[in-house]
Image: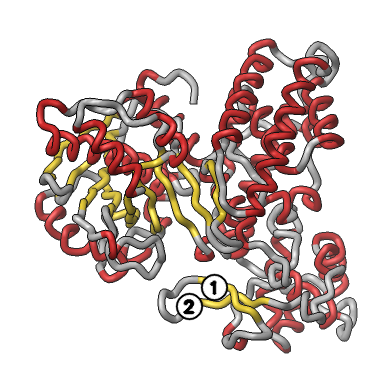
Amino acid sequence: MTCGALNPMPEAARYRRAPDTVMRLARMGAAHPTRLSFLRQLLRRLSREGWRFDRPVWEFDARGTGHAVYRAIGPERTYSLVAFGHDLPDEMRSDRVIATAWDATFTLFDGTPTPEDLSRLAQNVPLQEAGRVSCRELSLSRANKSVRLFAHVVGRLAEGRQPDAAQLAETGYLMRTTAVYGSGKFGAADRDRIADRAEMRAPFQAEMLSVWLTRAFTVDLAEHLARARGGADAVPLDPELRRMLGVGNSTGLGMAPFLVRHPVLLNNWMMAREEALARVRAQQEARADAVSGFHVALAQARSNADAWQSAHPLQQTRLTALRAGLAQLADHVTDGWETTGCHPWDALWQWAEGHLSTEAQEALAAAMVEPHGDLVDELGDCMDADEDQAFALDGAMTVAQTHALLRRGYGWALEIDHTTPEGSARFWYVSEEKLEPRLGERASEPGAERELPLDISRQAVALFDALESWPDETPVARVVMAAPEYRHILRRVQRSDCRPFAEIRDNLIAADVLPIDMLRCKLAFFGATRFDPRSDRWVRISLFQGAPYPQDLAAEVAL
């Protein structure tokens, strides 16, 4: 693990898990959020640096139509969430990406918007893809109500009563976003414009800030509508109940290819997480405060697993295994774990590898890391990436050297048979209608001639076979001049040599590939919880559930 911001910890090296273990979809699809997740990094920074928050604009009518501005005011810069509420008929409400109207639309503005800015944004933000924003906007998003829960909360508050806690816990959010766009989409600022800002250096900080402020808006809107209906009888939402609410999200295949298209970034995310776990396992002793914090984290994991519901058979099976594994773990740490022995955290992990399911192992990893902020939080500084630096291709490398790289880093790919119908059953393409990634069935659907180059394992095999016809001492520059179709995979092979976690070590066009495993891995790094797959291609999750609100952040001690 190398990063200029960190002091190396060589004693942790022997405790790091191998890429062949970590980078399999079955394990990536069992990922849990950790304290290195991007929303946790955001909240720690906002708290540590004493950011202030206000709501200088709130103009909404009794139907929930209007706009608001939420400001996050930091030591150097201000960011503003501009929110628009719409009176959306039920028949127009849809979570599908092809929807054209939503209950609310948002943008994160760089600075404090002027009246002229608000007028411009009012003409474009509600249109989403059909509108255009400027480089002053850092993200563009939209959300729909969780209709029954939203109506229940508004109705109860209007009557002067609190909503039913069980209903809040079951759903977990008043609104769910159906897209949060950033990084240059529809005219918004490119990542390069903000990447050098300390508060935006970690991945997806603008998007996380947007969603966190959106969470505050969802509660404010419900309370506003309750006052409009109930007048003096209306009451605000109880702070404990409010804390139970996050922001939901519906995410589909559009997110899945990201991990393949950004191998350097993926490597840095995974290395930081694996280094965190290794550092904990490398501790010769278990501090009393860390053991206490671990028990709290384990209890929270069990509570979350008990409340976590899913209608999808795959996730139901995983939830059963998770709950059983966490119960077994709780028994073990109570009766069988020697916290005073040598390397007790490693002993706990080795026990888990022999006794717990993959889902429960990954939950344990998050719980073990949780009470060790002093040991691992600095790793968050290594999770961004300058992908341009890794783009160059070394044309002087010989065919023999490239063959060696392939055997060392892509041996898993060379073992896959892509010539069978099952081995190349699917293909990735871009939908003409919405310009979003999709997954097609090669044998029964058209479009394979427009396949996206996400079949990394098949490309690696093709490169290996192509190099067989070239003399060992040949520079690969000659190979790509003669066969430029191998340039893409050759570049990946070269840059993956020093980035062992850059590739998903599975066949991404196989008949049994589950795209939701890719979605869950990425969303866990965001900090998502309550993964609820609705098919193998889209999932609902919750963000910021249990986290503080802007007005509470200053009182939080540990994040």
The one nearer the camera, 24 or 482, is: 24
Residue 188 coordinates in the image, percent (x, y): 32, 60
Name the residue beneath numbered marker 2.
Answer: 431
Residue 342 coordinates in the image, percent (x, y): 85, 17
The one nearer the camera, 189 or 290, is: 290
Which tag, 1 or 2, sits closer to the chain's start?
Answer: 2
Q: Quadrant of residue 420?
A: bottom right
Is residue 95 visible in the rendered image? The answer is yes
Residue 441 coordinates in the image, percent (x, y): 64, 79
Q: Residues within 10 Å of mark 2 (few under 14, many from 20)?
A: few
User: Residue 390 got which mark?
Assistant: none
Which amino acid type corresponds to the residue marked 1 in the rendered image? Arg
Q: Quadrant of residue 471?
A: bottom right
Placement of the N terminus among the 4 image quadrants: top right
Q: Secondary structure at mark 2?
A: loop
Q: Residue at x 41, y 59 (%)?
A: 183
Q: Secondary structure at mark 1?
A: strand
Q: Is residue 206 above or below residue 551?
A: below
Q: Residue at x 60, y 20 (%)?
A: 296
Which amino acid type corresponds to the residue marked 2 in the rendered image? Ser
The one nearer the camera, 135 or 170, is: 170
Q: Residue at x 80, y 19 (%)?
A: 284
The reply, left or right, for residue 188 in relation to residue 508 is left
Name the residue beneath numbered marker 1.
Answer: 438
Residue 36 coordinates in the image, percent (x, y): 57, 36
The reply, left or right, for residue 266 in relation to residue 95 is right
Q: Is residue 341 above or below residue 456?
A: above
Q: Is residue 486 above or below residue 72?
A: below
Callout 1–callout 2 Cβ contact below 8 Å: yes
Q: Residue at x 69, y 66 (%)?
A: 492
